[in-house]
Amino acid sequence: MPCTWITSDLQLLLILTLFLVAVNTSLSVPVGTKAVLSCPLVLCTSILLTTWEIVLRDKLPCFRAFRGDTNETKGRNCTDERITWASRLDENPALQIDPVAITHDGYYRCQMVTPNGNFHRGYHLQVLVPPEVTLVQTENGTAVCKAVAGKPAAQISWTPEGDCVTEQKHHWGNDTVTIQSTCYWEGRHVLNVSCSVSHLTGNKSLSMELDQG
Ligand SMILES: *[C@@H]1O[C@H](CO)[C@@H](O)[C@H](O)[C@H]1NC(C)=O
Ligand SMILES: *[C@@H]1O[C@H](CO)[C@@H](O)[C@H](O)[C@H]1NC(C)=O
Ligand SMILES: *[C@@H]1O[C@H](CO)[C@@H](O)[C@H](O)[C@H]1NC(C)=O
Ligand SMILES: *[C@@H]1O[C@H](CO)[C@@H](O)[C@H](O)[C@H]1NC(C)=O
Ligand SMILES: *[C@@H]1O[C@H](CO)[C@@H](O)[C@H](O)[C@H]1NC(C)=O
Ligand SMILES: CC(=O)N[C@H]1CO[C@H](CO)[C@@H](O)[C@@H]1O
């Protein structure tokens, strides 16, 4: 790769030093979307081997490798068809997950082997699931707001504030959480209440008129 803009060895050394540092980042992606994970940006040298290591919970680590000189790919213990190479490998050996599922929570690490050393980049991937939000009134006049099966847990708040009891239920099978908040506004002339659910995938608000019957 030509690198005419590098004028001195010192500059090259500085740039290499920057990229030689192993970097780990946290990444949150909504379920059902497409995620692309990039390898480190390596300049001014050829890439001999790129390896992705994928560590998902309750699974053997899986490896995918690409050899730059022979244009050859290999995989070991990678059975998930939703995880593939993203694009033209000789230009950018990124990893693609499409669509992202709740089981894709885990650690993903790209390693590039070059004549000037090894470069790493890791991602702690957290899959987000938006909760299903409902608001109903029960027979005795309480209002019940639910945020069902969100990941991570959602938070519920009310306008106006009432006397509320909030319960959490973990769905251990898939790491989602249901939050239920039950409120009443006894002795106050509250006609209209709204329940606000805040979550990393977006906030939602539902309101309803209390039936004073
Ligand atoms: C590597 O393979 C891809 C597709 O298989 C092709 O598009 C590309 O031109 C090849 N690159 C080299 C350097 O042979
Ligand atoms: C209203 O009814 C629910 C069950 O439907 C009960 O859990 C709650 O304690 C009741 N609230 C009041 C204020 O009586
Ligand atoms: C998680 O599990 C709960 C309870 O079994 C289910 O209602 C929900 O749909 C599941 N969510 C996902 C994203 O699989
Ligand atoms: C109840 O309050 C919400 C927000 O304060 C408002 O958007 C809605 O129109 C109100 N509904 C009624 C029936 O007053
Ligand atoms: C959602 O609500 C929380 C707290 O109520 C707030 O900090 C956050 O900025 C809101 N997010 C969006 C996308 O509006
Ligand atoms: C579960 C599984 O496929 N395990 C394989 C992982 O890769 C090694 C080496 O290729 C095999 O020996 C395992 O059987």
Image (tube, rainbow, N blue to C red):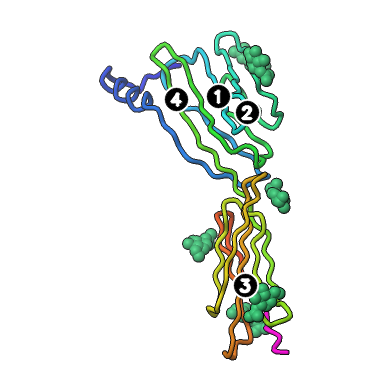
From which residue to which does the magenta span run?
206-213
State the SS at label 3. strand
Query: Real-space Cα distance between discs 2 and 1?
Result: 12 Å
**Residue bearing the label numbered 3:** 182
Give amino acid for label 3: Thr
- Point out the tag, 4 or 1, that comes first from the N-terminus: 1
Asked whether mark 3 lies closer than 8 Å to ligand 2, one says yes
Q: Which residue is mark 4?
A: 120
Q: Residue 122 location in percent, x, y?
A: 48, 31
Residue located at (60% from left, 20% from top): 64
Which quarter of the figure is the N terminus placed in?
Answer: top left
Which quadrant of the view contains residue 158? bottom right
Closer mark to the observer between disc 2 and disc 4: 2
Query: Do labels 2 and 1 touch, CB within 8 Å?
Result: no
Q: Earlier in the sequence, mark 3 or mark 2?
A: 2
Image location of residue 136, percent across then percent down: 71, 73
Q: Which residue is mark 2?
A: 59
Mark 3 to mark 4 CA distance (whole Å): 48 Å
Q: Earlier in the sequence, mark 1 or mark 3?
A: 1
